[in-house]
Amino acid sequence: MPQQTFDIHEFQEETLERVRQQEGLETRDQAAELLVKRRLRRGGFELTGRGRALYPIQGGSR
């Protein structure tokens, strides 16, 4: 996954730290990734009405 850097405010750092602790993650980066993935899933569901995978699916015949 490509790396992207963002400047964040102190209250955002505090929020990421709370999420990190609640979810048992090692870093704030992992907490940020978790929140982004959750938002993408929710957005995809709201857009299509269906859940979508956020990982590559190995091809196969149906």
Image (cartoon, helix red, strand yellow):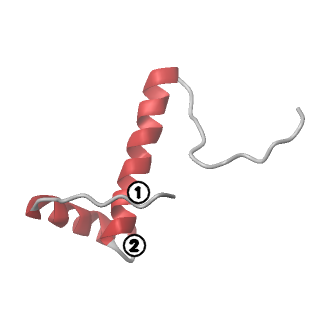
The disc placed on residue 25 is 2
Return the disc, 1 or 2, that comes first in the chain's sequence: 2
Left or right: residue 26 versus residue 6 is right
Left or right: residue 42 versus residue 54 is left
Tell me where residue 58 appears, x and y as whole percent. 77, 48
Q: Nearer the viewer, residue 14 or 22?
A: 14
The disc placed on residue 34 is 1
Farthest-out residue, bottom: 26
Q: Residue at x 56, y 27 (%)?
A: 50
Q: Residue at x 52, y 22 (%)?
A: 48
Q: Residue at x 48, y 29 (%)?
A: 45
SS of the residue at dot 1? helix
Farthest-out residue, top: 48
- The amino acid marked with disc number 2 is Leu
Tell me where residue 35 appears, x and y as whole percent. 36, 52
- Circles 1 and 2: CB atoms closer than 8 Å: yes
Tell me where residue 44 appears, x and y as whole percent. 48, 31
Neighbour tally class for label 1: few under 14, some 14-19, many 20 plus, Cα within 10 Å = some
Q: Residue at x 58, y 36 (%)?
A: 52
State whether residue 40 is above or below residue 14: above
